[in-house]
Image: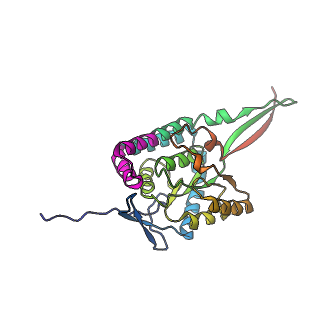
Amino acid sequence: MSERLAVRKTYKLFIGGAFPRSESGRSYAVTSSKGDFLANAAKGSRKDARDAVTAARKAFPGWSSATPYNRGQILYRVAEMLEGRRAQFAAELVDADGVTAKKAGELVDAAVDRLVWYAGWSDKIGAIRGAANPVAGPYFNLSTVEPTGVVAVIAPPMGPLLGLVSVIAPVIVTGNTCVVVASERAPLPSITLAEVLATSDLPGGVVNILTGSAGEIAPWLAGHMDVNAIDLTGADEDLAVRCEELAAENLKRVLRPPLDRIDWLADPGMDRMTAFLETKTVWHPIGV
């Protein structure tokens, strides 16, 4: 048999549990760390962002009302599925970041471990952040946490897998849904992760992943009235300022950590989980 042609993978968006092409029909070339062509990725548009927000909002009631234990089970399942495709993710990280195969494998392992870590917090964060408050009167005063809603996430340009997992997992484990703008520089691991999410019991619309230009998509998400919060981890200085101004007009929660000082291999702590939680306080009379 003569030498066969390679069957190249088609990288699409991930919206509402499906893999549509961008409505704009645009794509852009993704290259390796050495400048070699890897694939064409979809270049998401404003309309794609709106569709993703609609999908995230539709998924929010069911996901936020699921038991924390169930959300933890699903995150653990995502970790299992990611572990099963370890070799593929490692190969994509070698291409994207120019790291050795050994280092790429370690980064995939770290991403799996990060998912398991957050899965373990699913039914504990409420106990840590909730409280029974002392009050001057015959009342129970209880504080409980609730998810904020739909969160837009600008993924970090570096750490195309571990960084991506580290910004998505804390958002969804606490009951939020999200629209993620993947790393423009290295988007391929994000779509492979989307394939894992699509086959791991995660309801469609809980995570939506857009590839393309963060500078083009992020401002529309920051100004969108049906987005409740935005994580600007992957935004550069100019884009972050622009998004903060747009978010201020509709009172979004904004998380803007110092990207240049983030160590994705360090203990993540609880800050990212609590950033997108609301506290509800309930009073109840004490009676017999």
Q: Quadrant of residue 34 in the image?
A: bottom left
Q: Quadrant of residue 130 in the image?
A: top right
Of the pair 116 and 68, the residue shown nearer to us:
116
What is the quadrant of the N terminus in the image? bottom left
Of the pair 157 and 64, the residue shown nearer to us:
157
Where residue 189 sits in the image (x, y, percent)?
42, 54
Q: Is residue 73 visible?
A: no
Instruction: Please tell me which residue is depicted at 36% across the width and 43% down the height of the picture.
Output: 84
Examine the rendered structure and indicate whether residue 194 appears above or below residue 27: above
Instruction: Please tell me which residue is depicted at 16% across the width and 64% down the height of the picture.
Output: 3
> In the rendered view, does 285 fall on the left or right side of 126?
right
What secondary structure characterizes most of the magenta part?
helix
Examine the rendered structure and indicate whether residue 230 appears above or below residue 87: below
Examine the rendered structure and indicate whether residue 171 appears above or below residue 285: below
Of the pair 202 and 34, the residue shown nearer to us:
34
In magenta, the rendered stretch is 84-112
Instruction: Please tell me which residue is depicted at 45% across the width and 60% down the height of the picture.
Output: 18
Residue extending furthest right? 136
4 falls in the magenta region = no
Where residue 272 sits in the image (x, y, percent)?
61, 44
Of the pair 215 and 49, the residue shown nearer to us:
215
Where residue 28 sits in the image (x, y, percent)?
44, 69
Residue extending furthest left? 1
